[in-house]
Image (cartoon, rainbow, N blue to C red):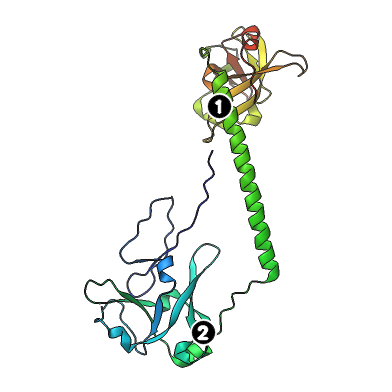
Amino acid sequence: MKRILGTTAIILSLTGPAFADAHASAGFGTTTAEATDFFASDLIGMRIYNSETEVDGNVAIKAGAETEWDDIGEINDILLDENGDVKAVILGVGGFLGLGERDVTVSMDAIKVVKEEGDTNDRFLVVTTSKEMLEKAPEFDRAMDDDVAAAAEEVDQAADKAAKEVDQAADKAEAEVEKVDADQDRAMLARPAATYDGYADANMEEMEALTAEDLEGTYVYGTDDDTVGEIGALVLDDNGKVTAVVINVGGFLGMGEKPVAVTWDELQVLKQSDGDDFRIYIDSNKEALEALPEYQG
């Protein structure tokens, strides 16, 4: 099993006069970049212009027309909420105000994208505000509360620990599956066609409803209805498919048993017709099962 570490690539779609609504894809690899899209890496650092009059984002401007606007600063960062939605962009403003640069926030729908005529593909980010409004805008404080920062660090550490444990468990499971594959280099047994009074073959729905807890400890019978062992464990692959069933054979009172691995296809499951009991059959006997290689999981 391979653990996939997902890295979120943020694409901000600025179509028309305002940022378009973000749409979450149901799966990986289904999103494509459009000509009107902005990558976050390109958006950060772009200059922001102020126009005293309203700007139509659907109308392209002539080359050099942006000089009529005031260059008020640049985008320093993008603020996301816990769901990954963009709350605001953080502007570094100052030169326009005759002050030292400071960060202020502006909502996405206040920014318009204006294209330049021709084939230059140049685009400009424009807001309509006033010097007075910018001067009164509160400075954005990036500082996190110490307790919040500490809690975030603890969450990160716990996530790293859990990820390592998942990797270790996956490696162990993969080794067990490989061992089962090696042990099963033998002639497969035919699925039995046993009958038992008051029982019938379990259908697909009943089979899918079975859990490891239901099966582990269940007796396994030979075709002559003699008990040949009991199910000790199910071995699953990365996709949750049963790759082997471990049967404990021999021994007495749980001592001296020998675990051997068979495939699910070699077993027959009967379900009680008017109850919830199950009987598991295999086309073998105790001596033949004890002769199989011992499962080392």
- Up-down relation of residue 133 to residue 36 (above or below): below
Q: Position of residue 51 (x, y in %)?
A: 36, 87
Q: Quadrant of the N terminus?
A: top right
Left-right relation of 12 to 146: left
Q: Position of residue 116 (x, y in %)?
A: 27, 77
Q: Marks 1 and 2, how far apart in space?
A: 61 Å
Q: Position of residue 53 (x, y in %)?
A: 34, 89
**Mark 2 sits on what residue?**
101
Q: Residues within 10 Å of mark 1 (few under 14, many from 20)?
A: few
Say which of 262 and 223 sits in front: 262
**What residue type is disc 1 on?**
Glu
Give the quarter of the image for residue 129: bottom left
**Mark 1 sits on what residue?**
178
Residue at horizontal 35%, vertical 87%?
Answer: 69
Residue 210 seen in render? no
Q: Quadrant of the C terminus?
A: top right
Q: Which disc is residue 111 wearing?
A: none
Q: Residues within 10 Å of mark 2 (few under 14, many from 20)?
A: some
Sequence-earlier tag: 1 or 2: 2
Q: Are marks 1 and 2 in contact (CB under 8 Å)?
A: no
Q: Position of residue 264 (x, y in %)?
A: 54, 22
Residue 97 seen in render? yes
